[in-house]
Amino acid sequence: MFTQLPVHYKLKYRLSSCRMGGVTLTLLLLCLSGTLSEDAGEDNLNDIMVQIQPEQGQDIENEYKTHNQHSEQEQDIESEVIFKQNQAPSLAETNSSCQPDMCNVLRHLGAMEARLTTAENQVEELSNMEAIVALLQRETEFQAAELRVMETKLSTSESLMRSMKRENEVQERKLQVLSYRVNATEFRVEQQQILLDELRRQNEDGPKIAFTAALGGDGHILPSERETNLAFSNVLTNVGDAYNPGSGVFNAPVKGVYYFSFSAFAYSQHNVCISLFKNNMRMLSACDHHSEHDRSDSSGNGGTLHLEQGDHVYMTLHAHSHIFADDHNRSTFRGFLLFRT
């Protein structure tokens, strides 16, 4: 039932028989081991084939022809053989009496195993490289997104810095204006301080002039047909002795600004009207006219005068005008030096 064939064909028969019959890779190794044993011959090979597939008989040759038409199946078998050879690498070493054809097959299988291992390693490396490339691409995309965010933040920061720069420029101009104003104010304060110091020095070094005098008497000073001088003879203060109570005239001892004021009192429905003169010039006046329901009349006035040294100031009573004098000192004339000029 089994046609005598060369050994390498018989190996292929066995491979085909093992695959076609659904025998596992372990059985394939047993087929190879039985083929390579020292006591095995063609009869043993035939016996093994009969034991493995006793029901196939003459169909083996047809199976071999069909097997030649399926090269891809043969390659799968060879790959499985390579895998099993990896599990039992000492197969060829333990069987030193293998036939030449089988040794060639084993060497081819070893070469194919090496190539397959190299290809698998390359595929694994390529897979790892693809994973690394994908990871790098994701990292690159993430970094690009971060870069865009940083560019946006940088643009915002630059806009904010430009805005702050403009605001700082405005503030600097305001500070410059304020600095000019402060400098001007400080200059004016210094000038005022100089003037105050000068006035203080003049007042400390210059004469002290001030007086207050009241009309002395025991009743009305009778009116006259013409305007007459008033002599305030009751002297209350006369610092510097610039006021003459006998004539009622104040003589300016120094050039400067003076302040003068006066008051006049009358009652019993009399008119009162007085004036202050500087030299021969009327400067100030105060008058009050009686009414039916007004039993007393009072008036007064005051102001500053710039006097030259030697100028004289005095008071007059108008014509047909009354003024009252008593010890209550209700009619007065007073003045003092403000500062020298």
Image (spheres, rainbow, N blue to C red):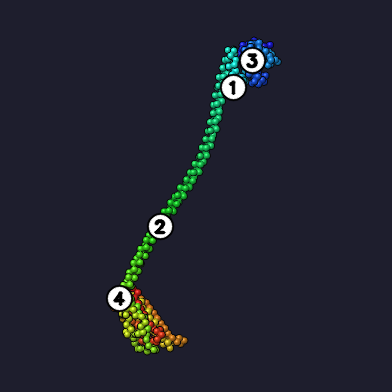
Q: Mark 1 to mark 4: distance in Å? A: 136 Å
Q: Is residue 275 visible?
A: no
Q: Mark 2 to mark 4: distance in Å? A: 48 Å
> How would you rate the neighbour count of disc 1 (Cα within 10 Å): few for under 14, some for 14-19, many for 20 or more?
few
Residue at position x 67%, y 19% from top?
21
Q: Mark 1 to mark 2: distance in Å? A: 90 Å
Asked if the residue under mark 4 is in contact with the one under mark 2, i.e. CB atoms within 8 Å, the reply is: no
Of marks 3 and 4, the one in the foreground: 3
The numbered mark at residue 63 is none
Asked if the residue under mark 3 is in contact with the one under mark 1, i.e. CB atoms within 8 Å, the reply is: no
Pick whichever, 34 or 171, lies toward us: 34
The numbered mark at residue 254 is 4
Which of disc 4 and disc 2 is earlier in sequence?
2
Quadrant in which the C terminus is drawn: bottom left
Quadrant in which the N terminus is drawn: top right
Q: Mark 1 to mark 3: distance in Å? A: 19 Å
- 273 versus 133 height, above or below: below
